[in-house]
Amino acid sequence: MQLNFKEIFTAFMVLFAVIDIIGNIPIIIDLRKKAGHIQSEKASLIAGIIMIAFLFVGKSMLSLIGIDVNSFAVAGAFVLFFIALEMILGITLYKDNGDEAITASVFPLAFPLIAGPGSLTTLLSLRAEFRIENIIVAVICNVIFIYIVLKTSARIERAIGKNGINIIRKVFGVILLAIAVKLFAHNIKALFV
């Protein structure tokens, strides 16, 4: 096992930007109002299990249908690009009408809000560049951070305010856009070599 703190930090920041838990605080508060209560532990744990499982099984699933990791990473770069555009421009390209508050901790909070298409695509894209143990540590760090944010979401919203959340969302959108470009450039070269 070879832990590389630069890889862990980069993977953590990429996942943090894609999951955008701070930017999702208004959605979390709305879900909490609809459901009455959100189980922060359950939502964080399920999201972490989904992400780590996909990290291991995702590549096998791709090879089963004949897609290599570099091709998936290029596709993931496009997904990240559009997520970044949503964050920067304040538009919604992907809409999910999962309004039912019956199992709000699992759906839509753990999946697809936290462990959604963007984060799963990102995990496989990261796997093309980084060692798997570093990605797992980054996922665990994100899950811990997600748990803290879910537990303190109301206080965070009061402290930062709507403008603060919007600024953070746009800053992470620009970072994510740069990461998408880097991911695309790195993996497109591997496809043509």
Image (tube, rainbow, N blue to C red):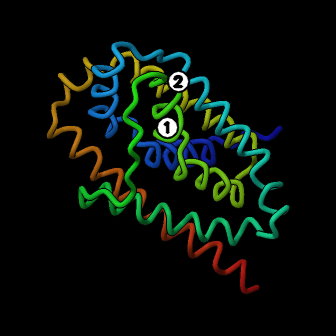
Residue 93 percent coordinates (x, y)? 35, 61
Among the 4 quarters of the image, the one containing residue 81: bottom left
Q: Amino acid at mark 2?
A: Ala
Report, in whole angstroms, how far the alpha carbon at label 2 lies from the one at label 1.
9 Å
Dots 2, 1 in contact, CB < 8 A? yes
Up the image or down, 120 lies above or below 149; here it is below
Which residue is tagged 1? 114
Q: Which residue is most to the bottom? A: 192
Marks 2 and 1, the one that precedes in the sequence: 2
Q: Residues within 10 Å of mark 1 (few under 14, many from 20)?
A: many
- Image x and y of residue 133, in percent: 75, 40
- The relative height of residue 70 versus residue 92 in the rendered view (above or below) is below
Left or right for 153, reference 138:
left
Image-quadrant location for residue 137: top right
Which quarter shows the C terminus?
A: bottom right
Please provide percent x and percent y for residue 180: 49, 65
Q: Which residue is tagged 2?
A: 43
